[in-house]
Image (cartoon, rainbow, N blue to C red):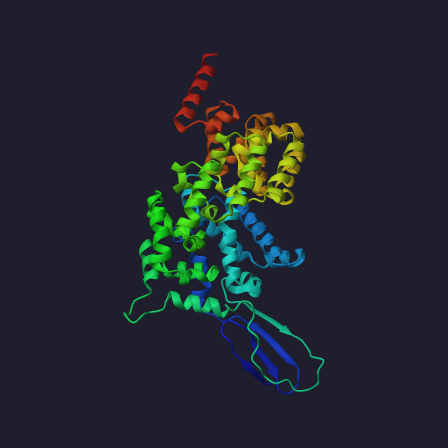
Amino acid sequence: MTSFMQLRIPNAKLAFFSRTSRVPLYRIVLSFPQKVFFCTAKYSESEVDGSFSLRLVPPTLVAAEKEEAKAVLTLFLKKQGLSNALAARAINRSESFIEHLVSRLHSVHKSRYLVGRELTTLEIRDALIPYLEALHEEYGSILVDVVESFPNPPVVEKIEETVEKVPIPVTPASPPSAVLDSKKLKALARVTDIGPTGKLPPHILYLVELGMDIERIRVITRKFPAFAYYSLEGKIKPVVEFLLDLGVPRSQIPTILSKRPQLCGISLSDNLIPTMTFLEELGVDKEQWAKVIYRFPALLTYSRPKLKATVDFLYEMGLSAECVSKVLTRCPNIISYSVEDKLRPATEYFRSMGVDVGVLLYRCPQTFGLSIEANIKPATEFFKDKGFSMTEIATMVSRYGALYTFSFAKLVLKWEFFLTMGYPRTELVKFPQYFGYSLEERIKPRFAIMTDKGVRLLLNQMLSLSEDAFNKALEKKLQKLIDS
């Protein structure tokens, strides 16, 4: 029987060597406590505990969101260097992790689901990408193993022969990129360092009092180790008090710091306040700073040339100063879109369709953050395949800018149900907002009630009216039928 020597390295490789055959065998095993594996999964920016039940979400919506989560994970893995084939294989082996991602969506946006509001592609991406990035920071090159074996620790076996025919000494394996480097390890240790007084460091206690648990602080530190070294009085507290003075609710501070911990390292007098003044000159409504910062705290960390380049582009597209102000206030993350790589190519594409780009930028700037190849073109082709002309598609996009922000899977589900309703296709040209309503919570129930009454309303009347106005419209239509 072949005997083995085993070298155990925490959170790293276990190297095995055969003493008799001189053939080195390697068994890659990630060894870590279950608590560590789930720590990042527990974290969410919405302050919820992840207890939202999948049973509250319609199966058709869950299926659509699984496809959306798969698309996000696929793009993320490809961004890390995986080929199309390897990324696809990883997705096929990651059913449990995909379900976990969907469950996370439901926890992060619990309030949205309770009122029947579905998430757009961008909202799903914004909820999942930071989480995947945090996992990548923690597990590095073995992220795929983590994903495929979720919720269990990954075990990947590999056996290979060596050309050398001499004994190979057992030596410690080099730590893989998944092992946190010494800088991160020191920073993480500082988070839970108990001082001579028997207490945590002052800045950690202050953050805990703000509502940040230790695990969330550790997640931030993994992503940004410098955060653990920021002083309480010189860095963290002044920024927190500044945000509170702006009107930011105390409950939102943990989310803001989680999204952009770098804020605590920026000088108030030299950078933050001057940047805010500059943005106000560019059009940001100073009365709305609390909402703007919560929506996109990174806004305050961009350079002035970057900020000005985006605003200049908006003016170039024909937006008035008032419209620019509203765009920056409602969608501050438009600043993060590259003018040359995102905004201008999207503008050229929509112009080629016949869309009024200025109107679309004002109504739904988020559309310009989508990938032309992965999101925008497929949506256009979808509607063309269903018989819509390019002019009709342009009209739909102009009337409902968010049309392209919904996932392909959701468009398919709603289109298929639309075909059963007996409305002409022109109703969707007149009212493309149909695709923004929840299929299970709004469209199907309203259609069933209307059908039971034996009357027919216009598509926009059926969906856009309030409950009371909807019932009155049905009664009026019914009475009209009786009278005739």
Q: Is residue 375 left or right of residue 252?
A: right
Nearer-the-camera pick, 422 or 91 = 91
Residue found at x 44% / y 38%: 280
- For the N terminus, which image quadrant? bottom right
Question: Where 41 falls versus 347 (above or below)?
Answer: below
Image: 133 above or below 345: below
267 with respect to 398 (left or right): left
Q: Going 34% across and 45% down the picture, which residue do you hit? A: 249
Q: Is residue 168 visible?
A: yes
Q: State the residue at coordinates (51%, 76%).
A: 9
- Asked whether the viewer can see residue 212, the reply is no
**Residue 241 in the image, given as x and y percentages of width and height:** 33, 49
Residue at the (52%, 57%) spot, across then down? 133
Q: Position of residue 444 (x, y in %)?
A: 49, 34
Residue extending farthest left:
197
* Image side of residue 294 versus residue 17, left or right: left
Q: Residue at the far front: name it.
A: 270
Q: From the viewer's perspective, is residue 461 above or below residue 229? A: above
Answer above or below: position of 393 versus 271.
above
Question: Picture quarter containing residue 205?
Answer: bottom left
Residue 134: image x %, image y %?
Answer: 49, 58
Q: What is the number of callouts on the image? A: 0
- Where residue 45 sits in the image (x, y, percent)? 42, 51
Residue closer to the observer: 238 or 82: 238
